[in-house]
Image (spheres, rainbow, N blue to C red):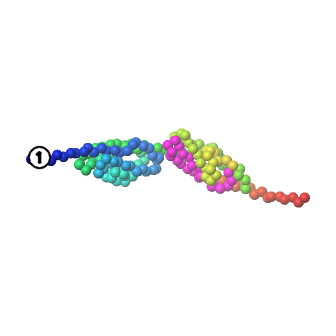
Amino acid sequence: SLGTAHAFIDAIANAGADTGICDNTCMQLNATGGVSYTWIPSFCLSSANVANPLFCCPDTTTLMVVVTNTFGCSDTDEVTINIHSLPQIDTSAVVINSPNCGVSDGSVTGISVSGNFPFSYLWMPGIQTTLDLTNAGGGNYNLSVSDGNNCSASMNFTLNSSGQPGVPVTLDT
C-alpha cells in the first residue's frame, strides 16, 4: 500500500521595513507570513501575540517576531523602530514687540531652533513661514516647527496691543 505524503511549507516571516517615528508617537506594526505571531520584546507593544500590535516606546528598539504557519513551521524576522527627537524651540533670547493698537506692526524675534535640519516654520493665524513673526496685530499666535524627520513642536505667543487706537479725522472744505 502507498503511504501518505505530507508537504510542509516553510513559514516566511516579515516584520516590515525598519523605520523611524517621532518621539511621543506610536505606530502600528504589521507582520506577515503566518497564522500566529509572537513579538519579542513585548514591553512597548499593545499585544505580543498579534500580527499588528501598536508600538509605543520612548527609545529606539529592535523587535523580533516569531511567525508560525498552519503547518507549525516557524520563522523569525526583525524590525528596528528609530525614535526621532522633536525639534527644540528656544525662547531664551526672544523679543516680543507689542503692536500699536489697531496697527499690524508687532513682532516676535530672537527664537532659535535645534534638531534635525532642514526646518520649516508656520505661524497661525496669518500663515507666515519664517522663524520670526513680523507685521502682526494683537492676538494669540502659534509657531509650529517641523524638522527633516517630519517631527514637529509648537509654542504659543501672545501679542498685546499697546496705546490707543487712532481716530480718523474728516476735514470739511
Image quarter of residue 173: bottom right
Q: Residue furthest top?
A: 117
* Type of the residue with mark 1: Leu
- Residue that appears at 45% across and 46% down: 21
Crowding near pointer 1: few (<14 within 10 Å), some, many (20+)? Answer: few
Q: Nearer the viewer, residue 7 or 137?
A: 7
Q: Nearer the viewer, residue 58 or 135?
A: 135
Q: Residue furthest left?
A: 1
Q: Is residue 138 left or right of residue 166?
A: left
Region in magenta: 136-158
Residue 53 is inside the magenta segment: no
Secondary structure at numbered mark 1: loop
The reply to whether residue 137 is in sight is: yes
The reply to whether residue 60 is in sight is: no
Q: Is residue 23 left or right of residue 109?
A: left
- Residue that appears at 77% across and 57% down: 166
- Residue that appears at 61% across and 44% down: 131
- Residue that appears at 31% across and 44% down: 13
Q: Nearer the viewer, residue 144 or 37?
A: 37
Q: Main secondary structure of the magenta part?
A: strand
Percent x, y for residue 134? 67, 47
Percent x, y for residue 108? 65, 48
Percent x, y for residue 75? 28, 44
Q: Is residue 15 above or below residue 165?
A: above
Q: Is residue 102 left or right of residue 30?
A: right
Residue holding disc 1:
2
Q: Is residue 129 left or right of residue 104?
A: left
Q: How many numbered discs?
A: 1
